[in-house]
Each structure stands twice: as C-alpha cells, then as structure tokens.
Image: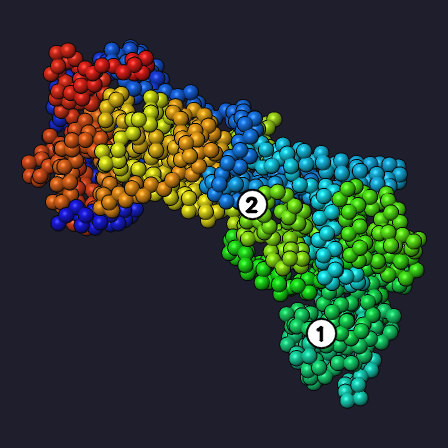
C-alpha cells in the first residue's frame, strides 16, 4: 500500500470524524507517578534569567481566532513568551543571546487610527492621481459601470453607502484585473422633492413673490450644494470616481441630450397626448409614475356594496318581467368615484345568479359583531329584493350581509350585456358592459363599478364601448361643479362620506365596512393618491413592448430572479405618463395653439429647442419668448402659440443618462457593462433606462444588472428617526458626539458591505459593526506579522519551489487555492464568499497553523538560514497575494500595508508598483496548485492530528505535568503501517521545518512501533485519534528529555555539550557560532 492510496482514503473520513466529534475520549493517566526530581530540576532551570530574553515580542503574536484552548495557556511560542512575562509585571533581564534573535520590525501600526490615517491615504491617492493613472495605463480592455444618480435632496443614508461601496469594490477589482475603468458619478437634480425643500424654506410672503425663474434658481442652488456635500461623503467612503467631471441632470448638455431622446421617441410615434386616468397626488398636485408610489401596510378604506337598479333590458331578456325591483350589486373601495360611474362591467364567461334577499332574515343591527360594519337601509325597505351577483360568491355574500340569499335563476355574463341601470346619484341610464379578465370571483360581487375617468382597466373597457370619461375632481383632490351636490368636498375625506350618505338616502346602500389593503401613496409626501383622468403626455410602451422584452432576455441579471421581476413589470405596462405639473424640471418642448389647443411639436421645433437648451440650459424655456423659442419658419405665427407648462417625469431625466453620459463622454461605451442599484429600481431607473433606450435604439443600455436589497437595523426593522434605530454612515466612520458612537472607519464599513448577501435585505447595527471591527483588527494583525518578519527580505533570497519544505509547499498550495476561489467570487459578484474565505483563511487558518509554527524558525532559526529564507519566501507570497485580494474591499488597509512594504514590487512590464492598485491581480501559479493530492490529504490529516495532540497537551498542562508545550514530548502510534512509516519519515526529516515536533510546537516527538511497553509512569497522559473506523492514532505526552535551551526554549539532550555555549542546543549553537549578520546585530 503506497502513500497516495492511504491519504486519498483518509482525507474525507478524517474530516467527517472531526465534524461529527467521533473521537475517542481522551484519558488522563495518573500523573503523580512522574519522577519529582526531574520536575524540580527543570523548574529551577526555567526560572533562570536566560528564560527572559525578549521583552517586547508579544505584540507581534498573531490572533489565534477560535481554537479549542487558549493558546497562551497550552502553547509555546518560544522566546516570544518572555514578552508576555514582562507585560504581566515580571522583572526582566536582557539575555546574552538577544542580539541573535530576528525580531519582527515594521512601522506599520497595530491600530488603524482610521480617523486620521484613511484621509491621509485618500490625499495620497488624490495627489498622485492614482485612479486615473492606473486606469489609463491598463491595457486589458474597458469596463464601464454606469452610476445610477442618487437624488440631490439630503444627507446620505446607509443605503447609499451599500450601493456606492458595492460599485467601488467592483471597479477596484476591475482595475487590478488590468481594465481601464470608467466611472462617472451622477446626481438626479430635478423634481418635486427639491422644489418642496425650496418652498419650505420660504415664508408666505416670499412664496407669493416667487416666479418660476426665481424658484428654479433656488432649486438649482440647493441641488448643487447637496451634490457637493454628498460627493464629500462618498469620497470619505473611499469611493474612486471621476469626481472632477460628474454628471448632473441639471447640466445644459445633459438636458439637451434628454430633449433629443424625447424627440426621437416623439418622431417615432411613441409620445402622445391624451386624457386618461393617471396616478395623481393631491398633496403634490401632480401626476405620478408607478415608480413614484409606495404601498405602506395598514391602509384602511371604506368599502361599500351598492344596488344599481336595473332600468331596462334587451327584448330577448325577461329578467325584469320575472323579478321586479331587480338590481345589480356592485362593490368598491373608492365610494368617491361613484358620481363618475359610467357602466357596470361583467365577465362574459362567469356564471351569474338572480338571488332573492330574504328580508326577514336580515339583521340591520348585525354590526354588533363588527362595530365598523354597517348594513344599509335597502335591505330592510323592500319586501322582495332581487340582486344580480356572481354565482360563486353567493355563500360569501350571505355571510357578509348576514342574510339568506336564494338563487332564483342563473346565466352567463354575456347574457346581460347591454342591460341598462339607473345611476344611483343622478338617475341617468348607464349600460352593462363586458369587461376583461380582471373581473373575478376572488372578492366583491363579480360585477365591477366602472368609471373610465378613475381607473386604467375601466378606461380600457370604456374605450371599447365609447363610454364618457368623467372625472369631476380638480388638482387639489376636490370635487368640481361637475360632481353637483358634492362640489368642493375632499374626495379622500368628507367627499367620500357624503357619497356614502347620498347612497344611503337614495336606498342604494347594501353595506359599508372597513377594508384593509395596499393603497398607493405619494412616496414624497407620504399621503394617499387617487386615479384621475387629466390631459397628460404619455410614452406608449405598448408600441415597443416586444422589443423591450427581447432586450431584457439579452441582459445578465444578478440575482437571476431579478429578470422575472422586471419582466412582469414591463410586460404589464401599456403607457408611461411622462408629464408633470411642476416648475423645476426639463420642459416638454411643445407649443399649443391659442384657439384650437392643438400641440405644435415636430423635428424642427424639437431640434431648435435642444440647441437653445444645450447653450443656455432649460431655464431658457421660462425666460425666453415664444418667438425666440420657435424656429425661423414659425416666428410669424408666434402670437398664435403659447408654451407648454409641463415638465418631464424625473424618471425620464435619469432614464436618459445612457444618452447624456454613455453616448457623449469620451472613453465611455454604450451599452454599459453594468448597472447596479437597489431592487426598487426594477420599476424605476432600470426600467426607465430600458424603455428610452429600446424605444430609440432597439437595445438595452446595459449588458448586466445587479440589484441589492434594503438596509435594515439589527432586528430586521426599517430604519426610522422616530424609532431611533437609524445607523448613520458618517457616524460609523467618524464617530459621534455620544461616547457609544465609536469611530470604526470606512474600511470597517466596507468590510460589512462585503460580508452581507446583498441580493436580499441586509442588517446593520452596533453589534454587527463591533464584529466587523474585530475581524478587521485580526486581519491587520496578521498583515503586520507578515510585514514585520520580512523586514530584511530581498527578491534574491527566494528559495526555489523544489527546495521548499513540504509544509511550505502545502502553504503555497493553500494560498493559491484561496486566491483562485476569491477571484471566482469577485467575478461572480459574490463578495460575501470572499469575506468568508478571508476570515477563515487569513484570520483563522493561517494564523493558527502556519504562522504559529513559523515563529520558531523566523526568530531563532538563523537570519540567513535556509529554513528561515524558505519561510520568508512563503510569507512574501502570502503578503503580496493577501494585500491585493483584499484591496478592492479594504483599500485603505491594503494601501497602508503597501506603503510599509520593506521591499519594492515590480510588475511584469518592469514598472515598480508604488501603490497597491498599480500591482495588478496575482498571476495564477499553476505549480503551486499542482501540489499532489495525496500530499494535500496527508497534510489535512496532520492538521487534524495536531488538534488532537493539543487536546492531550492541555490535559497535561491542567494536571501540571507541563507548563508550555515546549516542555512536552509527544509519543505517537498509528494502527496503519503506511501512516506509521510516514510519521517516522517526518521525525527523521532532513528539513527541520517538516519535523513533527516543530509542527506540534513541542521539544520532541517519538513514533512508537507498538504500545506493548508503554507504562503510565513514563507516559502519564494519553489519548486516541480516530481516523477511520479501524484506523487510530494513539497519542501520549510526557515531560521532554534534556534541558531547556536558553535561546529557543526547546528542551534538548544537547544542552550542556558545548563548552563555548553550554546553555544552547545544537541548532542554536550552530546559529550563534556563525558570523552575525549586520541587520540582526543592529536589532
């Protein structure tokens, strides 16, 4: 049986044993039988002054992470323990061999001092123009991440931080990948929120004197000030961008490009004007797009069931003959729309029934079971009441109305088409019509009150039947004169109540009850909206919907389910209302004839206005006269026209950024490689950009789209000032006035961003940030250790791979595997996996094993010894790889390390990388990855065996058999002969680094061929390690043989054999007998 067979067989079962805790119980023998004289003599030796050599090494100990036992108790780090002794107040004496120890040396601090150091590093980047220079020098192709513009109306919140840091991580990674990265930051500067901010800052008198031009000037000033403040905050996050040349939607060149997009859509027939229902905000007095709505939980409407008395029927229909006093039962959650009712719609395929309402069974006081539910008088005023309802809803309505409904006859919806009923408010006759699939039996009565002026589906049905579009509501949400008796009432307040009372008075009310459902609110004012028919400008999405759906399929969506979301939103959209009744925005470039009101808008007028705006900005629309705004050929007719007063939807503003930025700026490309925004942008910027791009160019403006979730507090609640749970990114970075508001720095915030699965909602709070800070601190400590132990390193010292000890080759294999996995995670935008890998490898695995073992040969192995140089070869590889793979996430830390490198780093083209982002991504080393599989399995076994050895060492320490692990001798016996021989080979290895006692951090290891003569007196503490069902490794611990070396603290039989250095072991004697290198001597 060869090694490869054994260790390929051992690998997986061994790991399973570790995970399932299927180890044999460790047994403690009677330790008191150990010879006391030996213990006393060794204890006396341990107290000699030579045991206290290095009083200041403890700060270089790397963090151990999570281990079975506290390393300070069970482990020995050689002479580094002297530093611990001093920190605990022991009297220190300099050892005579101190100058022979290679101490770590670096100016790199253990504390980040991020409040000071991060801004210093950012100034270093700015002064040296690192971003632009690295990007221009790269030759691996172009990468364009197009920035979705945040709104310029306030301070940044944690959602902004998540978004911008994610973008920066991607851009910085692409820089290291040799891409020319182009990232132009943008801001959305028009719209109602900014206009409201301006108005709120003025008193009543000032508002009265506010002309459109003055308002726009104040709005522009406010937006630009906000942009300046937000830009400074983004920079403090460590975000790299072309900050000197951002795009603002208020810039004249941007506005002109937007007008151009609008013109192209208009000339292709996609822009039209019409009177149709749109979302209207009475609180903002403007139309709203779907993306400007929110649907808060808990909205309650007054829902009503109403009887519409049937007035006439077609000749073929005998319903009125058979059932006098017959009515249509409808249900609505918007009673205020009843005055605008024009029809009742039914589903042609549904079964309907005439039901007799058993009036004797009606309890008009049934509201006792539901205090807010009220039955109408219509149920008690008629001896025989007949209603038409959907057959499937009869049982539901019986329970709802607290009455018995007797089915008298049934028919399909198609059979009652063109019946006519009497309007319950103004007594006009209206028809029964056939609606669409939106009429179901999920709720209501199966008959739908239809008001084309107040609903999209109603409007579509109305077009088919030529129904009047009645909308007796003004901009403020008040009934107009057209509403008759309700004139001047608020439709969402007393107007709603008045309609209900009128229906009750007219004996049409069946029941009123509260109805809890999702209802659209204005996302800015947080107040309810209404559907209202007004004259607006629309983009006909229906005209290019198929092309948009095809374009969606060509895009890479992350996460993949995002495609389903935008597909469903786009496929159901027929029109996009793009006009707004506000002053602060880009004007819709249209003129209206004074008499006919017909719009004037063609290629000539649009191009002329675009030309004016590109030079003077959109303010020109307000201060220039009509004759100046019209092209030459129309100027004689200028007196016949007036300028339109509508502005464009802000989503049309930002949705044109691909044209204004990607299509105009040098170095940028269209489509962009990537868009990255919050998941709410499927109905916002992602969609508006898609629609404008497809309408004009037939393709999406992006090749890939990434969406992230919302940021919640640690308990999963939405952040709110009223709840006091807001986590402010500025406070996280800089600290706050309250002592509990610790300054963590930008890198800790960035580390948090990398740690979360951003594809869903993410949590943040004080506890989470403390965890991130702890991980950051440990990572920094590991990097400091690497720097400190490479203080005398030169490239000339590199040990060829073939000459490296197996432990070093294994370490390089692990490093290369980790680097490869991290690259794959960056490529897939799975940053949380990178965080997990870094945390596990750098903070835990590397520190707990390789660096722990490496200290002995680094400190006492001899400055220029082969074993130290081989270790430094590995450390240099780790330092250069780790600092570069973390750089996109932790750029300040990476640059801080890079500026502390004790040696220059030259990239392939011969250029010396003065900054970490000049260094490029680590080149994959296939030789490191070719480490034999059987060796990988074997070293996995050794690591697990080391864990079990440490357990037995801890038992020995607890029983006071030993103090540190260097006072121990390990005995091993393997039941498998192949493993036994491999362990014997390691003990006899010519390369000191591969020997088991160095790996276990003990003074000796002995491999036993059998357990026949192992007496408990000689080996007091034992345990067993189960590799497979029948493969065991027996572990024993005793006191080490020999005396303690004054220099390395290992116990050896050689101590006392050298006349010139009687207190040293053989290895240390060889080191100190050599000429002392200048660097070591200087230390």
Would you name the residue on which mark 2 appears?
Answer: 144
Q: According to the image, label 1 marks what residue?
A: 435
* Residue 876 disc label: none
Along the viewing direction, whichever of 406 and 769 lies nearer the viewer:
769
Where disc 1 sits, the SS reads loop
Q: Earlier in the sequence, mark 1 or mark 2?
A: 2
Where is residue 542? Give x, y as percent: 68, 65
Residue displayed at 84% across by 38% down: 214
Few, some or many residues within 10 Å of mark 1 (<14, 14–19, 20+): many
Relative placement, left or right, of 157 versus 533 is left
Residue 989 locus on image (x, y percent):
16, 33
SS for dot 2: strand
Q: CA distance from mark 1 to mark 2?
A: 48 Å
* Residue 569 placement, left or right of 426: left
Residue located at (88% from left, 37% from top): 205
The colour mode here is: rainbow
Asked whether the beta carbons under mark 1 and mark 2 sit within 8 Å of each other, the answer is: no
User: Considering only vertical position in the picture, is 361 above or below 537?
Assistant: below
Examine the image and state in which quarter residue 264 appears: bottom right
Assess disc 2: are there few (<14), some (14-19) or many (≥20) residues with their C-alpha within 10 Å of its C-alpha.
many
Hey, which quadrant is residue 899 in on the image? top left
What residue is shown at x 59% (from left), y 33% (from top)?
Answer: 235
- Relative to 536, say whether 774 is above or below: above
Question: Which image quarter: residue 876?
Answer: top left
Q: Residue 855 placed where, x, y %?
A: 29, 26
Q: Residue furthest left?
A: 1013
Q: Residue at x 47, y 34 (%)?
A: 917
Residue 456: horizontal and vertical position, in percent? Answer: 73, 65
- Which quadrant is home to the C terminus? top left
Residue 862 seen in the figure: yes
């Amino acid at each position: 049986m060869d090694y490869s067979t054994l260790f390929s067989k051992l690998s997986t079962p061994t790991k399973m044993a570790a995970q399932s805790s299927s180890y044999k119980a460790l047994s403690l023998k009677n330790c008191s039988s150990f010879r006391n004289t030996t213990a006393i003599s060794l204890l006396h030796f341990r107290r000699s002054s030579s045991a206290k050599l290095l009083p200041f090494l403890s700060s270089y100990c790397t963090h151990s992470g999570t281990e079975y036992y506290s390393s300070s108790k069970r482990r020995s780090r050689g002479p580094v323990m002297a530093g611990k002794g001093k920190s605990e107040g022991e009297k220190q004496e300099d050892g005579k061999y101190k100058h022979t120890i290679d101490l770590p040396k670096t100016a790199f601090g253990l504390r980040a001092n991020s409040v000071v150091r991060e801004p210093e590093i950012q100034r270093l980047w700015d002064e040296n123009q690192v971003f632009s220079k690295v990007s221009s020098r790269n030759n691996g192709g172009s990468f364009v991440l197009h920035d979705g513009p945040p709104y310029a109306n306030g301070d940044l919140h944690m959602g902004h931080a998540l978004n911008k840091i994610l973008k920066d991580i991607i851009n910085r990674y692409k820089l290291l990948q040799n891409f020319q990265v182009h990232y132009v930051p943008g801001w959305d500067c028009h719209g109602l929120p900014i206009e409201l901010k301006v108005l709120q800052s003025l008193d009543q008198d000032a508002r009265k004197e506010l002309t459109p031009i003055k308002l726009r000037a104040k709005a522009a000033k406010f937006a630009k000030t906000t942009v300046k403040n937000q830009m400074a905050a983004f920079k403090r996050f460590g975000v790299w961008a072309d900050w000197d040349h951002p795009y603002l939607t208020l810039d004249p060149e941007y506005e002109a490009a937007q007008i151009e997009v609008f013109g192209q859509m208009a000339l292709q027939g996609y822009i039209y004007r019409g009177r149709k229902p749109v979302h209207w905000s009475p609180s903002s007095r403007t139309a709203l797009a779907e993306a400007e709505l929110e649907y808060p939980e808990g909205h309650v409407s007054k829902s009503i069931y109403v009887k519409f008395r049937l007035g006439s029927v077609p000749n073929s229909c005998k319903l009125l003959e058979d059932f006098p006093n017959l009515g249509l039962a409808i249900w609505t959650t918007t009673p205020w729309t009843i005055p605008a009712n024009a029809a009742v719609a039914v589903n042609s395929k549904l079964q309907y029934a005439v039901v007799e309402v058993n009036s004797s069974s009606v309890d008009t006081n049934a509201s006792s079971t539901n205090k807010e539910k009220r039955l109408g008088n219509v149920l008690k005023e008629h001896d025989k009441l007949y209603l038409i309802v959907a057959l499937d809803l009869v049982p539901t309505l019986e329970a709802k109305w607290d009455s018995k409904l007797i089915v008298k006859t049934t028919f399909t919806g198609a059979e009652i088409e063109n019946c006519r009923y009497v309007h319950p408010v103004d007594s006009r006759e209206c028809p029964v019509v056939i609606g669409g699939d939106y009429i179901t039996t999920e709720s209501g009565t199966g008959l739908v009150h239809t008001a084309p002026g107040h609903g999209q589906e109603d409007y579509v049905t109305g077009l088919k039947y030529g129904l009047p579009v009645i909308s007796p509501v003004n901009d403020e949400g008040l009934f107009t004169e057209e509403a008759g008796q309700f004139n001047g009432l608020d439709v969402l307040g007393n107007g709603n109540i008045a309609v209900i009372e009128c229906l009750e008075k007219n004996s049409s009310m069946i029941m009123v009850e509260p109805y809890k459902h999702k209802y659209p609110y204005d996302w800015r004012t947080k107040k309810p909206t209404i559907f209202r028919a007004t004259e607006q400008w629309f983009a006909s999405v229906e005209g290019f919907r198929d092309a948009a759906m095809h374009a969606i399929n060509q895009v890479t969506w992350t996460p993949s389910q995002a495609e389903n979301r935008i597909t469903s939103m786009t496929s159901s959209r027929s029109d996009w209302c793009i006009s707004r009744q506000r002053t602060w925005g880009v004007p819709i470039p249209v003129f209206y004839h004074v008499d006919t009101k017909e719009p004037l808008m063609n290629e000539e007028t649009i191009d002329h206005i675009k030309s004016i705006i590109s030079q003077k900005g959109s303010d020109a629309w307000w201060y220039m006269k009509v004759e100046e705004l019209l092209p030459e050929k129309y100027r004689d007719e200028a007196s016949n026209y007036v300028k339109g007063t509508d502005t464009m939807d802000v989503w049309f503003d930002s949705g044109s950024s691909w044209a204004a930025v990607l299509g105009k700026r040098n170095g940028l490309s269209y489509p962009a490689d990537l868009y990255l925004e919050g998941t709410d942008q499927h109905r916002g910027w992602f969609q508006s950009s898609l629609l404008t791009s497809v309408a004009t160019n037939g393709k999406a403006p992006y090749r890939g789209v990434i969406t992230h979730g919302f940021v919640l507090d640690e308990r999963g609640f939405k952040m709110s000032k009223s709840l006091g749970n807001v986590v402010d990114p500025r406070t996280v970075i800089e600290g706050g006035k309250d002592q509990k508001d610790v300054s963590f720095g930008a890198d800790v915030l960035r580390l948090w961003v990398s740690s979360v699965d951003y594809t869903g909602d993410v949590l943040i709070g004080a506890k989470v940030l403390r965890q991130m800070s702890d991980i950051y601190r440990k990572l920094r400590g590991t990097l400091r250790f690497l720097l400190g132990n490479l203080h005398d390193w030169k490239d000339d010292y590199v040990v060829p791979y073939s000459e490296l000890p197996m432990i070093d080759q294994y370490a390089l294999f692990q490093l290369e595997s980790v680097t490869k996995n991290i690259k794959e995670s960056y490529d897939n935008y799975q940053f949380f996996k990178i965080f997990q890998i870094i945390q596990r490898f750098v903070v835990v695995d590397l520190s707990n094993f390789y660096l722990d073992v490496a200290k002995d040969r680094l400190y006492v192995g001899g400055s220029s010894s082969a074993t130290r140089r081989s270790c430094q070869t590995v450390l240099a590889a780790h330092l250069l790889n780790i600092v570069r793979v973390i750089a996109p996430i932790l750029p300040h830390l990476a640059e801080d390390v890079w500026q502390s490198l004790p040696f220059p780093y030259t990239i392939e083209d011969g250029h010396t990388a003065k900054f970490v982002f000049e260094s490029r991504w680590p080149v994959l080393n296939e030789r490191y990855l070719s480490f034999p599989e059987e060796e990988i399995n074997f070293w996995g076994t050794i690591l697990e065996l080391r864990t079990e050895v440490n357990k037995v060492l801890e038992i020995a320490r607890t029983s006071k058999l030993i103090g540190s692990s260097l006072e121990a001798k390990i005995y091993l016996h393997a039941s498998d002969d192949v493993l036994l021989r491999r362990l014997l080979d390691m003990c006899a290895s010519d390369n000191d680094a591969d020997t088991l006692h160095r790996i276990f951090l003990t003074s000796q290891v002995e491999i036993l061929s059998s357990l026949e003569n192992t007496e408990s007196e000689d080996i007091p503490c034992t345990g067993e390690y189960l590799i497979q069902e029948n493969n065991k490794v027996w572990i024993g611990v005793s006191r080490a043989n020999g005396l303690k070396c004054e220099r390395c603290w290992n116990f050896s039989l050689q101590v006392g054999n050298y006349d010139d250095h009687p207190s040293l072991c053989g290895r240390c004697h060889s080191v100190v007998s050599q000429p002392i290198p200048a660097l070591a001597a200087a230390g």
